[in-house]
Each structure stands twice: as C-alpha cells, then as structure tokens.
Image (tube, rainbow, N blue to C red):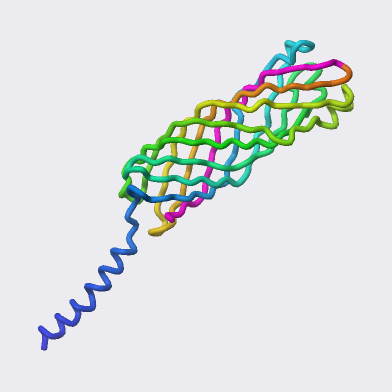
Amino acid sequence: MKKITAAAILALALPASAALAAETPQGIGKGDVLLRVRVIGVLPSHTSGGVLPSLPNEHIKTSSSAAPEVDITYMATDNIGFELIAGTTKHHVSGRTGTTGAIGKLLSSWVLPPTLTAQYHFNPKGAMRPYIGAGLNYTIFLNEKASKSLKTAVGPTNVHLSDSFGWAVQAGIDVDISPKVFANLDVKYIDLDTTARLRTTAVGTQRSRVHVDPFVVGVGLGFRL
C-alpha cells in the first residue's frame, strides 16, 4: 500500500514540477525579440553660446523634457542584441544671459531621435541582466516655432533647427518579474548638436550652435514577444 501511495504521489508531483520549471524565468537567448515601454527624461547636459553675428557673448539653453518611449531589441546571439528606440519629446530653447536672457523662451520644437545601438548583455540566462551598448543617433527637429516673447521683441520670426547625426552610448539592466515580463532601467548619453537659425525683420538672420548632448534616463517594463 505504501509503495502504491508513493508511486501515486510521485506521478502527481512530476507534472507539477515540470509546470513550475516552465514558469521559472529563463533569461534571454538568441532569436528573442524584446519590447520595452518606458517613461524617459531627456536631460540636456550643456548650454550653448554665441548668437551670431549680433550677440556673440550671449548664452542659450535647452529645456529638459519627459515622454513615453518604445524600443525593440533583437537578440542576434545569447549576449549580443540590437536595439532601436522610437519616441518624441518637446523642448524649448531659452536665453540665459544678456538680451536673450531678458527675452526668456526663444523657440520650441518637437524632437524625434531614432537611435540604434549594439548591446552586450551580461548574464543572459539570469533573472538580472545588466547590459551596455553603443551606436548611432539621427535627430530630426519638427514643427519649430518662435516664441511670443521673441516675436514681441524683434517682430515676425522664422526659426529652424538643423538635424543632427551623432553617437550614443548606454547602460541598463533588465530584472525578471515573470517569464514574459521584466522591469527595465536604462541610461543613454547622446551626442546631439544643432544649429538654430532665426530670421527676423528687425535684426536679420542670427545663428547659434546648440550643444544639447542629453542624458536620456528611462524606466519601464519589457516583454518577451
């Protein structure tokens, strides 16, 4: 009787153990596709100077911004993946000193910065997976508009921000919550420079080289597709 009972318990336990093992996070591997949804903060790290030719000693700055972002990663091997991000944020360029500082906000623009990075994932089969990456960024500026305060100061103004091509580096970590869902923390630094051009009836065409060079800090959830 004891033998029969033990055999019955074993027969019941084996499928349960197999099911539990199937539910245990298994990390990532070659061929996996990872989708992450984050909230990001875009934090410019530099101010810019020289509104040329009229105000060479002026300094201007770019505002920080927050927005949702989506990225997708394809794992080419267990350790190496390629990530493409997509998101857009709105930023303001404002004066810091002198005449432009008195005006305040000069212009606004939407920013679309698609970035492709190659990543190396440490501990790919673990529940906690740090990674580093490096790649390229192409930033597109959209719907640039002069501010009301600038138009009040110098009259009707046309503004334009040149697109930017640069490099990017990143570091982050994925932490499993379930077999298909994980938490993510990611930090990027993007080499992003643009030339702001302002055409006014009062002072003609003015230009300034704007060094944005933001840190992009993101936190969110990821999904194994």
In this rendering, position of residue 220 left or right of residue 205: left
Q: Quadrant of residue 164?
A: top right
Q: Residue at x 85, y 29 (%)?
A: 149
Question: Up-down: is 216 above or below 39?
Answer: above
Percent across and percent down for residue 98 are 78, 16
Q: How far across and down, in percent of the image, does residue 68 sit?
A: 60, 47
Against 175, residue 85 (above or below) is above
Q: Is residue 94 left or right of residue 73?
A: right
Please tell me whether residue 72 belongs to the stretch shown in magenta: no
Residue at x-position 89% and y-position 24%: 155
Which residues are drawn in magenta?
Answer: 203-225
Above or below, comparing residue 28 to residue 41 in the picture: below
Q: Main secondary structure of the magenta part?
A: strand
Position of residue 76 measured from the top left corner of the image (x, y, whole percent): 36, 43
Does 215 sit left or right of 99 as displayed?
A: left
Q: Nearer the viewer, residue 193 or 16?
A: 193
Question: Is residue 170 or residue 117 the one in the foreground?
Answer: 117
